[in-house]
Amino acid sequence: MTATPHILILGGGLAGLAFAVAIARAGEALSGASLKVTLLEAQAFKSGTPNPLDTRASALNLHSVALLKDWDIWSSLAPHCGVIEDIHVSHRGHFGSTLMQSRDLDAEALGFVAENHNLGRYLLERAQGLGVEIRAPLRCTSLRTDQDRPALETEDSEVLDADLILLASGVTPDWFDDLGISIQERPAHTHALVFNAVFPGRQAGCAFERFTQHGPLAVLPLPSTHRHEQRYNVVWSVSETEVDALIDLSDEQFCGRLQEAFGWRLGAVSAVGRRSQWPLVRSLASEQWRAGFLLVGNAAHTLHPVAGQGLNLSLREADLLAKTLIAAVTSGQPLSRISSLRGYLTQVAAEQQFLASSTDLLATLFNPRGVLLDSPRNASLALLDLLPGARAHIARIGTGYRHA
Ligand SMILES: Cc1cc2nc3c(=O)[nH]c(=O)nc-3n(C[C@H](O)[C@H](O)[C@H](O)COP(=O)(O)OP(=O)(O)OC[C@H]3O[C@@H](n4cnc5c(N)ncnc54)[C@H](O)[C@@H]3O)c2cc1C
């Protein structure tokens, strides 16, 4: 009797959880055979609801929503999501703006905004419901490549092996070195300042991309918690020299700076939540498979968040890997061999290159010091209106249907 193929996932962030769900869900379709999925996470999973002013959020494109429907998660998550019906793109202090609307794409929405704690909670519940063994909190201390099968060691000195180990542990350079994998990094010398902000009035389902002298400001609609308030998640890309000064401002001073940068389109900012900062480094692993270890999520690729794509890409990859593994199990191929994963690796490399260059292009286009914006800045926004191809390109990145 052949042993049940075992997939071990190291890291229970949003990517690790999504891979666990996708693989366990696809495994349900196997008749006779089955798959064992284990997920190891260093931190205890949090329960409870954070302060609505202090949540973090991700923009989900329509392809991601289709996957979440397929995984039976969307019906629970959807009521907690903000809806993006329109995207308004403009430059502070300059004439000219562009509007992308869901009707341009004949879609119910351009995308949705999920708060990370909700997305994580529903992914975790679904993974547990599908029989994924969750081992948390439990830290991995080293990867083991000296065994017949890929293995890792935990802080309890337990050695866990599997047919395939997914490294969903974020950017962990020491381990990449151990595997002989290098990382191509492109630091942007920019930080994302992330926070929630509240404005008066009813939520109208519009997201804003505003280009300021400091850098782009993405303002994404969140579900309202009070009838007469609109809540937004804001990602403001600022230079590394400015970020600390903005973090150190009092809430009142910071609201003033935000108002100055964003303008009055949504009225007066009435509150802001806790500010956090993320250095924006675009990185791609030179190889994503080595000796039975497969890099996924941020470990494989970290994209500039200007187009909100990192997680969306990981969800698509989770779906593709799940299908690849099921095909391999069905045809009796060993999961630890690269030959079983070659099709997956080729497809994801092409997609990752496309998205990395697209998001780099957007980051350059909208960088305050960028060449294209040195010309009258409104010109590039007008360009989006004049060139339906360029607009469609950005919209396609947004919807996630590259080939649509
Ligand atoms: C400001 C910002 C905004 C973004 N907005 C969007 C967006 O709108 N849309 C979008 O698609 N993407 C967005 N992204 C990208 C998205 O957040 C990430 O792609 C996503 O969170 C996936 O991360 P991950 O799970 O790969 O890594 P992480 O979130 O880093 O998770 C790694 C996990 O591994 C665990 N781990 C690490 N080491 C060990 C160990 N030794 N033992 C056990 N466990 C370990 C960690 O505890 C952690 O839980 C954004 C990113 C940023 C920075």
Image (cartoon, rainbow, N blue to C red):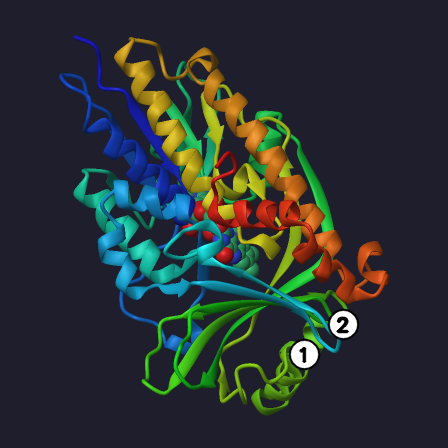
Q: Is residue 221 left or right of residue 352?
A: left
Q: Residue at x 26, y 64 (%)?
A: 79
Q: Quadrant of residue 192?
A: bottom right
Query: Residue sitting at 44 percent across and 69 percent down?
Result: 221
Residue 320: image location, x then y, percent: 40, 29
Q: Is residue 303 left or right of residue 185?
A: left
In the displayed structure, 245 sits above or below 159; it is below
Residue underneath mark 2: 213
Mark 1 residue type: Ala
Crowd rating for badge 1 (residues with CA inside 10 Å; few <14, some 14–19, many 20+): many
Residue 303 placed where, x, y %?
60, 47
Query: In whole angstroms, how far apart are the C-alphas of marks 1 and 2?
Result: 8 Å
User: Is residue 23 shown to the viewer in this render?
Assistant: yes
Q: Which mark is residue 230?
A: none
Visible residue check, residue 139:
no
Q: How many marks?
A: 2
Sequence order check: which comes first, mark 1 or mark 2? 2
30 or 396, which is in the foreground? 396
> Callout 1: helix, strand or loop?
helix
In this view, 35 is above or below 210:
above
Residue found at the far left of this picture: 32
Please tell me which residue lies in front, 317 or 372: 372
Q: Nearer the viewer, residue 312 or 325?
A: 312
Residue at image x 74%, y 54%?
365
Identify which residue is drawn at 42% across, 51% down. Answer: 106
Q: Are marks 1 and 2 in contact (CB under 8 Å)?
A: yes
Which residue in the protein does label 1 denote? 261
Q: Estimate how packed mark 2 is, as few (under 14), some (14 to 19) or many (20 or more) residues with alpha carbons within 10 Å.
A: some
239 to the left or right of 230: right
